Image (tube, rainbow, N blue to C red):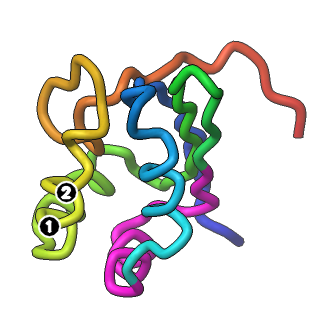
Amino acid sequence: MSTPHHRVCFLLQVRPERLDEYKTRHQSVWPDMLAALSETGWHNYSLFLKDDGLLVGYFETPDLAAAQSGMAKTEVNARWQAEMASFFVDLEGTPDQGFLQLNEVFHLD
């Protein structure tokens, strides 16, 4: 039996003048960052970007608070969040903590 996963969808706004660089950074995410995400419960993680900078993220996790807390304890996440924070408009905190989480209203399995 698999662990139930909560679906998390979120929004952030990427600065329009930094869209190309943002996309480039995500073509080669550091291997230790990818490993840390997996190890702390971030699964089936995707990012979608509109031409105006609207970023929609989606991932599944057994426990959002534990996933965020786990990443907050890693050195690689501190480096990644510090490098990525300047890409976003009106961000409070780090990107992995300051996103606007959306409420799920429908799911078809």
Residue mark closest to the camera, 1 vs 2? 2
The image quarter in which residue 7 lies:
top right
Q: Is residue 33 magenta?
A: yes
Where residue 79 is drawn, which disc sits there? Answer: 1
In terms of depth relative to the viewer, which is nearer, 93 or 59?
Answer: 93
Q: Is residue 30 above or below residue 72?
A: below
Q: Is residue 34 magenta?
A: yes
Q: Is residue 2 above or below residue 81?
A: below
Q: Is residue 66 above or below residue 38?
A: above
- Left or right for 85, reference 59: left
Mark 1 touches mark 2? (CB < 8 Å): yes
Where residue 93 is drawn, which disc sits there? Answer: none
Q: Which residues are magenta?
A: 31-46
The image quarter in which residue 75 lies:
bottom left
Q: Position of residue 47 (x, y in %)?
A: 58, 46
* The N terminus lies in quadrant: bottom right
Q: Secondary structure at mark 2?
A: helix
Q: Residues within 10 Å of mark 1 (few under 14, many from 20)?
A: few
Residue position marked by numbered label 2 in the rendering: 83
Tally the marks. Answer: 2
Q: Position of residue 64 (x, y in %)?
A: 37, 45
Q: Residues within 10 Å of mark 2 (few under 14, many from 20)?
A: few
Residue drawn at 39 percent across, 69 percent down: 37
Q: Is residue 60 above or below residue 38?
A: above
Callout 2 amino acid: Glu
In terms of depth relative to the viewer, which is nearer, 102 or 29?
Answer: 29
In terms of depth relative to the viewer, which is nearer, 44 or 106?
Answer: 44
Q: Position of residue 24 (x, y in %)?
A: 50, 61
Q: Secondary structure at mark 1?
A: helix
Callout 1 amino acid: Arg
Residue drawn at 57 percent across, 32 percent down: 56
Give the CA distance from mark 1 to mark 2: 6 Å
